[in-house]
Image (cartoon, rainbow, N blue to C red):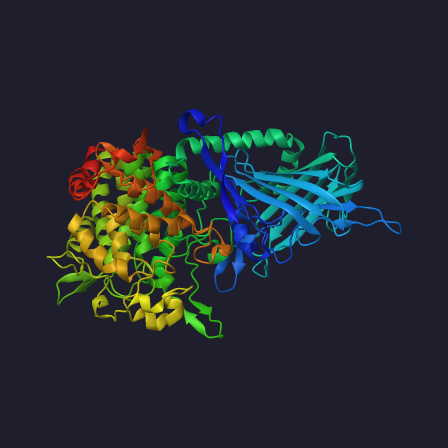
Amino acid sequence: MLNVSTHNSQQNQQLIGTTDWNVIETEFHPTQLHHKETVFTLGNGLLGVRGTFEEGYSQDFPATLIHGVYDDVTITHTELVNCPNWLPLVVKVAGKSPTKTLRERFCMDSGKILKYERRLDLRLGLISRDVRWRSPSGHTLDFHFERFTSLADQHVLAIRAQITSVDFEGEITVEAGFDSEPDTKGVKHWRTLNQGGIDQIIWLNSQTLHSDIQLGMAAKLVVDGDETRPVGIENASSSPTLTTTFELYPGKTATVEKIVTLFTSRETEIPIAAALQRLAHEPRYTTLLAAHIAAWDQMWQDSDIIIEGDRLAQLSVRYNLFQLLAVTPRHDSRVSIAPKTLSGFAYSGHIFWDTEIFILPFLTLTQPALARNLLTYRYHTLPGARRKAQEAGYQGAMFAWESATTGDEVTPRWVPAPNGELIRIWCGDIEVHITADVAYAVLHYWQTTNDDDWMRDYGAEIILDTAVFWESRVQWNQERHSYDILDVIGPDENHDRVDNNAFTNLMVQWHLQSALALWDWLKQAYPETSAQLGQKLNLTTERLHRWVEIQQRLFVNEDAQTGLIEQFEGFFQLEEINFADYEPRSKSLQGLLGIEATSQKQILKQPDVLMLLYLMRDRYDYNTLVTNWDYYNQRTDHSYGSSLGPAIHAILACDLNQPTEAYTHFLRSALVDLEDVRLNAAEGIHAASAGGVWQAVVFGFGGIRMTQFGPVACPNLPPNWTRLKFRLQWRNEWYDFDLQAETELKVPALADTYSKISEVIFDLDEVLTDS
């Protein structure tokens, strides 16, 4: 089971007192093995490591995934590959019997587990495990394992194991090595170039089979308190392993440290040389750990959220933020965050809209330098986006629905069904809203940071060339005298190949309006850059006038009186169902009814229109929100549809002064991995949901709105929350919010506040002019 523990942070006590920082597993259940591997994932911005045991376990899924390390594969084109495993640390107990010497390997599936606890300390970025184990022959020992992936030096990984005898007397042998031939869902991606060991150090030099990325890894083993104890090397040419042996007796503890360094050819020309050189100068475990803890402390100073009155919410929010901070690249602007972070194999490590719409708001407002890295990744993939547009017969830049290294489309067009039939996947061809989503994130970053230099050098080209794409993507409807965007998929993937998806069309309208305003700013602020871009992208006066006309005449079916927006043309004519008829269930309605049947019904995987109203909340009034909420909320598969939806529902429920319903939606996001609420956490962390959790707390319960004067709060806390505290950085200034329950705005004030705040919401044109 998982529960909550209290950890006193002396350093932060003056600011936030006693807080909840620990995810704890108190019983080991083999049936939950893969789920808990996900839960106990560690990362440091370069790599992620699933929470498998150092000694291994039958049928486990060990994985070390490194940003940008892709290799070719069938169907999905390329995938983020499982890298050689650095964890292996085996303890063997050499007890004696009257007839022979027994060598029993410590493992959780042999002997008997008398006590067990595994802990993820979110504040420290540290995994620990305590086990009292009775060996098959009856020897009892206590084991304490710790490990971390250094946030202070992303090339350093470390394990410490303490072995204490309870009733055993005899020799203990510790073996430390690598697993040099991992697979990625059964596919091999590595070949060993060389490996070996000398002077108490082992190394491994590997290369991917197709992308030719090299990985160099080195390790040393130290016996703490007895540094002179010999460490031998076995199997140097085939499977180099560090070994050491020592005597234990009841009450005695032995401590060993495994320090690992790791580089790839993405960072350095000869990674094995870099790994060996770094390892030779690495200090001891405690020194490395201190630097790692200091780095995490700096992260939490700006990104922590404090919730009082609800320990479950406090722990789950911190857990989600931890997983985002752990995966965000710190020194690399050519990679981004995949939907399963670096914690699992699902989606092949490809990059979707999840990063821009769900994750980036958190980073933009608390770690803007890291947000800039992720947005610069999109700039680097512009050539791939241009190739995609050209291949599809369009102009400008059309971002891939699934992107990897180059930005070329890597969504599979056909995937095999369980029965062997091929299923056509249309997302890569027509789920085009991602192009506007990227532009939205770029503008949000700029509005928040005032980073004019980045916008001049990177962001402007993204926004303008993607606007060129929209110009070529729309079609004129002579009968209606409007522009259409036909044959698309909106965020609600239960309905594909639809016309005039409201989310897509209105995001395109916003995109073109923003591009025009940006162009005016660029001409005034940086005329030389604007001249260069104008020539490069062929931004003629006629083209700009066409953008004006398109954004004015894009078709959206919105009832002028009620404000009800049709999700796409023909949605209102689809069959309605009673969701209660299908309860209870443990899968999505699409999974129950089938793809074709679901597409003919008003069943939403994800709330297109409500998502739109959230992203464009400054453009729509309270009554429009109420009307669309009442219609679409009840038609959404909240339990097993998209994990991206609940956090957005939580925010809008707060806007509608429904904090209790908001809290229900919030928990669906906050606990999606900790409690495996969708029964798929074994596949990896739900990164977009984690970003949505932060937005639900800050923009929902905290009621943060961005105005021309900075962020302001209009809180609507859940009934059991007595305090909500967080920080936001806006235009290089920090704003600290400490919201108490008694400061909450009550109905009917909220509807009035919604209207009043809308009057002072950040206006893009005004911002551009002021800039």
Which residue is nearer to you in this view: 211 or 53? 53
> Residue 321 vs residue 508: left or right?
right
> Residue 215 vs residue 44: left or right?
right
User: Which residue is most to the left?
Assistant: 561
Which residue is nearer to you in this view: 549 or 3? 3
Q: Residue at x 67, y 41 (%)?
A: 143
Query: Whole-percent x and y of residue 211?
Result: 55, 54
Q: How many marks?
A: 0
Query: Whole-percent x and y of residue 252?
Result: 74, 34
Q: Residue at x 44, y 64 (%)?
A: 412
Q: Residue at x 55, y 55 (%)?
A: 34
Q: Quick check: can you spot residue 397?
A: no
Query: Whole-percent x and y of residue 555?
Result: 18, 60
**Taking 550 as reference, is 756 above or below it?**
above
> Residue 240 vs residue 648: left or right?
right
Q: Quick check: can you spot residue 173?
A: yes
Tell me the quadrant of the picture where the C terminus can be found: top left
State the image quarter where residue 401 is shown: bottom left
User: Which residue is most to the top?
Assistant: 14
**Taking 288 as reference, is 431 above or below it?**
below
Q: Residue at x 39, y 70 (%)?
A: 592
User: Which residue is most to the right?
Assistant: 99
Query: Whole-percent x and y of residue 737?
Result: 31, 32
